[in-house]
């Protein structure tokens, strides 16, 4: 069954009382669940978990709470149940925004979690990749630096770690901000 792509679902992520977090054991489960839920049309976001609910993974999926039963059904069918579902009922239970943007005039740097991607706004050339401690970071940097956003491979296609996933998020945010 397809998720709802409505204004209410999208704005549900902005309201404090009708959101929830899906907490998973590890990053690969978050990545798989995110892909699956987006494929089904749900408006979800990957966020850093509030310290009160952190279990094993450094990421959670924020979702519209009204869609909980349908979302859990889809995840169960794929044998991908979350460790727990946490409704956001307390103003103290806020996710950590994993994006930080730094404007250097001609250059734009986006940090997602522990990975940074810097691009020349005029040419959309990727000029730097840094951060992380995963073994695929040098490979990702070599594959992306010196290419335009349009010509560079998607980090998600060639990376296999949390750093690769975080770099994908930075890459998508840079694309949005550079209108690519």
Image (spheres, helix red, strand yellow):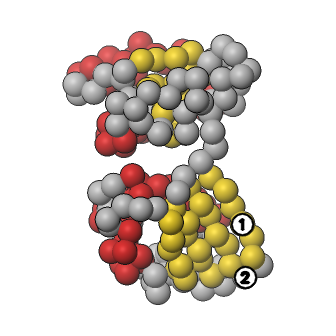
Q: Residues within 10 Å of mark 1 (few under 14, many from 20)?
A: few
Circle nearer the viewer, 1 or 2: 1
Coordinates of residue 116 in the picture (x, y in percent): 55, 66
Determine the secondary structure under disc 2. Answer: loop
Residue name at image x 66 percent, y 23 percent: 93
Up/down of 119 relative to 9, above or below: below
Taking the image as drawn, is residue 157 in sight? yes
Quarter holding residue 19: top right
Taking the image as drawn, is residue 172 in sight? no
Q: Which of 101 and 180 is in front in this view?
A: 101
Q: In which quarter of the image is the C terminus?
A: bottom right
140 on left or right of 77 = right
Quarter holding residue 152: bottom left
Q: How crowded is mark 2: few (under 14 residues within 10 Å), some or many (20 or more)?
A: few
Coordinates of residue 105 in the picture (x, y in percent): 77, 78
| Disc on res. 102 | 1
Q: In which quarter of the image is the N terminus?
A: top left
The residue identified by callout 2 is: 106
Residue name at image x 39 percent, y 52 percent: 162
Up/down of 91 relative to 56, above or below: above
60 on left or right of 10 = left
Coordinates of residue 165 in the picture (x, y in percent): 41, 54
Q: How many labels does the image show?
A: 2
Residue name at image x 40 percent, y 32 percent: 56
Up/down of 53 relative to 109, above or below: above
153 on left or right of 101 = left
Q: Distance between the residues labelled 1 and 2?
A: 11 Å
Up/down of 137 relative to 145, above or below: above
Coordinates of residue 24 in the picture (x, y in percent): 38, 29
């Amino acid at each position: 069954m397809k998720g709802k792509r409505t204004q209410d679902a999208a704005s549900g992520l902005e309201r404090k009382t009708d959101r929830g977090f899906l907490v998973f054991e590890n990053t690969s489960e978050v990545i798989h669940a995110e892909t699956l839920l987006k494929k089904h049309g749900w408006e979800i976001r990957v966020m850093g978990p509030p310290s009160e609910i952190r279990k094993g993974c450094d990421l959670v999926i924020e979702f519209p709470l009204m869609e909980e039963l349908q979302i859990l059904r889809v995840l169960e069918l794929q044998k991908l149940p979350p460790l727990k579902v946490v409704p956001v009922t307390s103003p103290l239970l806020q996710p950590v925004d994993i994006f930080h943007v730094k404007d250097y005039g001609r250059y734009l740097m986006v940090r997602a979690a522990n990975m940074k991607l810097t691009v020349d706004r005029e040419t959309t050339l990727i000029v730097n990749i840094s951060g992380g401690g995963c073994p695929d970071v040098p490979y990702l940097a070599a594959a992306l630096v010196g290419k335009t956003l349009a010509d560079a491979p998607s980090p998600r296609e060639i990376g296999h770690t949390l750093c690769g996933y975080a770099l994908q998020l930075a890459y998508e945010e840079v694309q949005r901000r550079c209108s690519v």
